[in-house]
Image (cartoon, coloured by chain):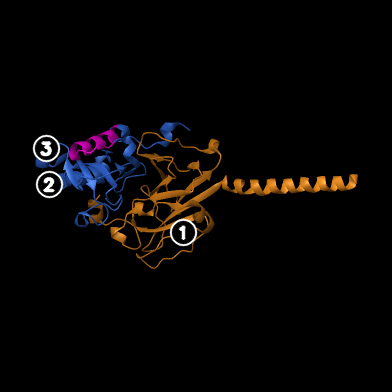
Chain colours: A orange, B blue
């Protein structure tokens, strides 16, 4: 009787541990997710780099100000999502139009929006609004990735989990004058 | 990290004042009553400007009844000389005969984007100032 009680007790202990691990693991994986946003020149497949190469990102509705993330030498801007508020490294609001941060860490949210100073290669191209790209599903991007259409050239990229690839091109002179 | 190290550089007028300036110009021009609460998101953009620099754009969420996209000088004399703060109610991609921004919200009954340019582009001199001040490094990319 005692042995059986010990066995039941042991099993329930193991079960508790398993449940705890199963509950904690997804949270741990979410606590350090990194989103990569890559700007690719749709005309030639090269990364968009330079002093004025960046993306504006809004994660959820927490901030009105865009988080401007400069791209690196590979045309990639990185954004870390966390569930731990102590890891967040930018303020909720600064009163500025944009918060510039090379390595932003922000609170995880189910959706995010992107805007960048280029023309999106895709349907409508020259008449397309970047802000039409709003409401990316964070989970979908983390799970499957996203690659925008490319009507500027023949360059293609396969979607990678956690990565948003945007085919863009610089503005023409007249497009610049419209701003 | 200090806050000053991570916020956008201040290109002259403090950005909060820029937001108020844009809202005031919009309300004065169209008789709207937009307040900070109507500002759904903000970003800076000017052609060639580094991250965080450039014209401050306010994306407004609220009725746009009575608002017409276009350029509206804040002072009457800007119509004549071209130079001066000019409210730009952006019609968005493909709007205004194709002469409008691709970086902003599509103008609609409940949303619009506003910013202030440094010249009235329908005046040749204003077009020059708009280019020089808002689109080149020489102009310092003023926020409003």
The image shows residue A74 at horizontal and vertical percentages of 45, 54
Q: Is residue A140 visible?
A: yes
Give the alpha-carbon distance from disc 2 to disc 1, as whole Å.
43 Å
Mark 3 residue element: loop
The numbered dot on residue B7 is: none
Residue B111 magenta-highlighted: no
> Which range is magenta?
B17-34
Image quadrant in which you'd find residue B67:
top left
Residue at 42% from the left image edge and 34% from the top image edge:
B5
Residue that mark 1 sits on: A146
User: Mark 1 falls within which chain?
Assistant: A
Would residue A171 be found to the left or right of residue A84 on screen?
Answer: left
User: Mark 2 falls within which chain?
Assistant: B
Q: Nearer the viewer, residue A1 or A159?
A: A1
The numbered dot on residue B76 is: 3
Pointers 2 and 1 in contact (CB under 8 A)? no
The image shows residue A23 at horizontal and vertical percentages of 65, 47
User: Mark 3 falls within which chain?
Assistant: B
The numbered dot on residue B123 is: 2
């Amino acid at each position: 009787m005692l042995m059986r009680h010990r066995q039941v007790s042991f099993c329930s202990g193991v079960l508790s541990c398993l449940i705890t691990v199963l509950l904690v693991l997804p949270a741990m994986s979410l606590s350090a997710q990194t989103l990569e946003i890559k700007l690719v020149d749709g005309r030639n497949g090269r990364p968009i780099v330079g002093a004025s190469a960046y993306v504006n990102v809004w994660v959820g509705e927490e901030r009105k100000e865009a988080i401007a993330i400069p791209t690196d030498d590979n045309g990639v801007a990185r954004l870390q999502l966390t569930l731990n508020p102590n890891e967040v490294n930018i303020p909720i609001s600064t009163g500025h139009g944009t918060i510039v941060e090379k390595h932003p860490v922000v609170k995880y949210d189910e959706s995010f929006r992107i805007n960048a100073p280029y023309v999106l290669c895709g349907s409508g191209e020259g008449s397309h609004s970047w802000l039409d790209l709003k409401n990316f599903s964070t989970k979908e991007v983390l799970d499957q990735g996203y690659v925008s259409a490319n009507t500027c050239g023949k360059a293609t990229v396969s979607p990678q989990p956690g990565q948003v690839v945007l085919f863009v091109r610089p503005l023409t002179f007249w497009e610049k004058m419209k701003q | 990290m200090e806050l000053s190290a991570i916020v956008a550089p201040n290109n002259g007028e403090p950005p909060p004042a820029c937001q108020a300036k844009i809202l005031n110009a919009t309300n004065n021009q169209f008789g709207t009553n937009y307040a900070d609460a109507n500002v759904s998101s903000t970003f800076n953009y000017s052609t060639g400007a580094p991250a965080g620099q450039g014209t401050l754009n306010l994306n407004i969420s609220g009725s746009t009844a009575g608002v017409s996209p276009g350029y509206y000088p804040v002072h009457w004399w800007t119509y004549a000389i071209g130079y001066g703060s000019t409210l730009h109610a952006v019609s968005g991609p493909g709007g205004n005969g194709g002469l409008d921004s691709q970086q902003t919200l599509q103008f609609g009954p409940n949303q619009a984007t506003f910013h202030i340019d440094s010249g009235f582009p329908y005046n040749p001199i204003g077009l020059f100032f708009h280019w020089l001040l808002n689109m080149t490094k020489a102009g310092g990319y003023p926020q409003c």
